[in-house]
Amino acid sequence: MDVRDEANWWLFSVDPEDRRERITATDTGAREVNPATADGRHLLEYRSYIGLDRLLSCQAPSSRVPDERVFIVTHQLFELAFKQMIFDLSVVAATLSRLLEKEDEEFLYLCSSADEEFWLPSLTASSRIIYAGRTVLPVCLGYLAPGENGSENFSSREFRSFRPNLQPASGFQSAQFRLIQRALGKENFLGIRIFPAEEYWKNYESGEEPGPARVVDPVILRADVAIAAPSPGSPFHIAATLDDLAHRVLARLSPPGGKTAPGVAAISPDRVEEAFEGFYRLLSAQRNLQEQAGEIPADAQEKDRRAKTFFRGDLEAAVERENRRRATLGPAREGARYLRALAPRKCLVLVLDRLSAADTALHGPQEESFLSQHLHITARRIKDLSDLAHQEGKPEPPRGTGGGGVPYLAHVKRYLLPLFPALVAWKDDE
Ligand code: HEM
């Protein structure tokens, strides 16, 4: 990403005093948009304002297949929507951070008020986050979804002819998506080594996979690790702190006596055990498929043993960290109860409800969630590819990522993501 091009984007403010001020060239790194010429004219054009030349010249298909174009454009539409979501999460985080700087009296007033000047940026931002999760992403995904009544926007047969050209790249490498997950309370989930990264190791590092990887591992995300796991100096950092900021606001609202309240319910050992069993079933199903295709690797047993050890160790550590955190969130849950009673339907309640609903829209188990719809598409497309390969007498067993990660996506959605919801203390009080 070109930092200079990004500079204006991140020079936003939620401060009622200065947020409507124009960005001038004297602001660090900023670009002055539409300055006056010496004779007082303005030369801005639609095209230069929205960077149209660059935007419309960054599609480079690998093949002559017409359907490859919509494959690229759909992913680009998503990344733009993700960019806007990250920005909107940052606006809410910046507002909560500002709120925490206020003295007690003003803090309480703002938490329980409909103060437009203060809350407007967060109200529109949280509304957009929900709109993206519920509407924009599913609609864009429709370009690649299986059609109805024989009407298809995208053909698996055509997909098959260009998908191999793209190895090892995959949507798995969307760092912006990982940052959204981090903002929505999934930091502990992101530390679990579960995903096969064989193709990435082989292609990027000319090396052997040392075992399954975290989705934010540099071998998967490359330079974009700095987006998915931003350091404090990065403009992306504020979004990464959103879940924590929301809990700090709630804890401060805890009434006297609530400070010693018992924590939020811990993740139960049964759910952890279910996740292990699901993972073991997944590994053996993958091996069965490979066996049927006569492609089982010689070191399969050793690899599976290592994958199980990593997964068990990391999941136990992630759950322990999450439970330790939940144990400290009693005051935040009491604050949530107090806020809902004190100021129902006021701005802060609306914003927190929307964040929690956006998490469900993205990660929830319901059929319409982004991950359910994406899984539906992936399962169908990858199955079509396998069927076509079979028809041609070329068995195509799952092979790690770069197309073969579907069972992992299903496992994560069913067993892992529900353990790490956004705003857990807010949700716990519902
Ligand atoms: C024909 C359409 C698509 C297919 C067949 C497909 C396939 C896959 C597969 C197989 C994976 C698992 C990783 C792997 O094996 O490489 C994956 C992951 C992912 N894909 Fe897609 N995908 C499609 C469209 C999209 C679109 C349009 C997006 C939008 C950005 C997207 C975003 C993602 C993300 C974020 C992940 C990681 C999800 C997670 O870890 O929970 N995919 N995709």
Image (cartoon, rainbow, N blue to C red):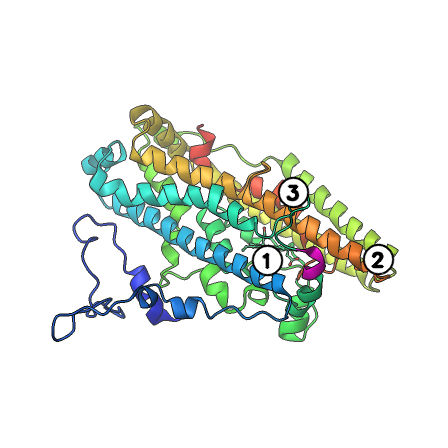
Q: Earlier in the sequence, mark 1 or mark 3?
A: 3
Q: Amino acid at mark 1?
A: Arg
Q: Earlier in the sequence, mark 3 or mark 2?
A: 3
Task: Please state which of the two labelled residues, at mark 3 or mark 2, is closer to the viewer.
Answer: 3
Q: Residue furthest left?
A: 39
Residue 103 sits in quarter: top left
| Frontmost residue, 369 versus 410 | 369
Determine which residue is flagged by label 3: 148
Determine which residue is flagged by label 2: 391
Q: Is mark 2 within 8 Å of ligand 1?
A: no
Quadrant of the image where one finds ligand 1: bottom right
Q: Is the N terminus in the top left, top right, bottom left or bottom right quadrant?
A: bottom left
- In the rendered structure, the answer to whether residue 211 lies left or right of residue 354 reads right
Residue 197 sits in quarter: bottom right
Q: Amino acid at mark 3?
A: Glu
Q: Amino acid at mark 2?
A: Gln
User: CB under 8 Å between callouts 1 and 2?
Assistant: no
| Image position, residue 48 (x, y; %) | 32, 68
Q: CA distance from mark 1 to mark 2?
A: 35 Å
Q: CA distance from mark 3 to mark 2?
A: 24 Å
Q: Secondary structure at mark 2?
A: helix
| Image position, residue 334 (x, y; %) | 38, 29
Determine which residue is flagged by label 1: 214
Image point (28%, 66%), residue name = 45
Image point (34%, 48%), residue name = 93
Q: CA distance from mark 1 to mark 3?
A: 36 Å
Residue 1 visible in image:
no
349 over 96 or under it: above or below: above
Q: Which segment did they paint magenta?
A: 155-159
Task: Please state which of the two labelled residues, at mark 1 or mark 3, is closer to the viewer.
Answer: 3
